[in-house]
Amino acid sequence: MLDRMGLKGSYNCTLQWTPADSPHLLDASDPSLFAMIQEQLGLKLEPAKNPVEFLVIDYIEKPSLN
């Protein structure tokens, strides 16, 4: 995750949303998660390509008893 908001501190937010594949969903025209985040929290998620750090594990085994 890349944070480009520049806001400092901690925030406590509540988002109410029902996933599209939920059996409780009655109307397929309900807004997407991205739309609900923008509507309820005022945040817009935008796709971007950025370099990320990652770790590759080539081999693993249990340690010996010695």
Image (tube, rainbow, N blue to C red):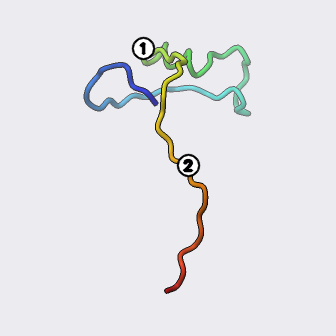
Q: Residue furthest bottom?
A: 66
**How many marks overall?**
2
Q: Which mark is residue 56?
A: 2
Q: Is residue 58 above or below residue 64?
A: above
**In the foreground, 39 or 5:** 5
Q: Residue furthest left?
A: 9
Q: Does dot 1 land on a helix, a strand or a loop?
A: loop
Q: Which mark is residue 42?
A: 1
Q: Is residue 16 above or below residue 38?
A: below
Cα distance between the residues tagged 2 and 1:
37 Å
Question: Which mark is nearer the camera, 2 or 1?
Answer: 2
Q: Is residue 8 left or right of residue 44?
A: left
Q: Does dot 2 land on a helix, a strand or a loop?
A: loop
Q: Which mark is residue 13?
A: none
**In the foreground, 42 or 55:** 55
Q: Earlier in the sequence, mark 2 or mark 1?
A: 1
Q: Is residue 27 left or right of residue 3?
A: right
Identify residue type, mark 2.
Answer: Val
Identify residue type, mark 1.
Answer: Gly
The image shows residue 47 at horizontal and vertical percentages of 55, 18
Can you tell which quarter of the image residue 14 is in? Answer: top left
Q: Is residue 26 left or right of residue 60?
A: right
Can you tell which quarter of the image residue 60 is in? Answer: bottom right
**In the foreground, 58 or 31:** 58
Q: Is residue 24 above or below residue 30?
A: below
Q: Residue at x 54, y 80 (%)?
A: 64
The image shows residue 1 at horizontal and vertical percentages of 46, 31
The image shows residue 27 at horizontal and vertical percentages of 72, 18
Classify mark 2: residues with Cα within 10 Å, few (<14), some (14-19) or many (20+).
few
Q: Residue at x 57, y 54 (%)?
A: 57
Q: Residue furthest front?
A: 58
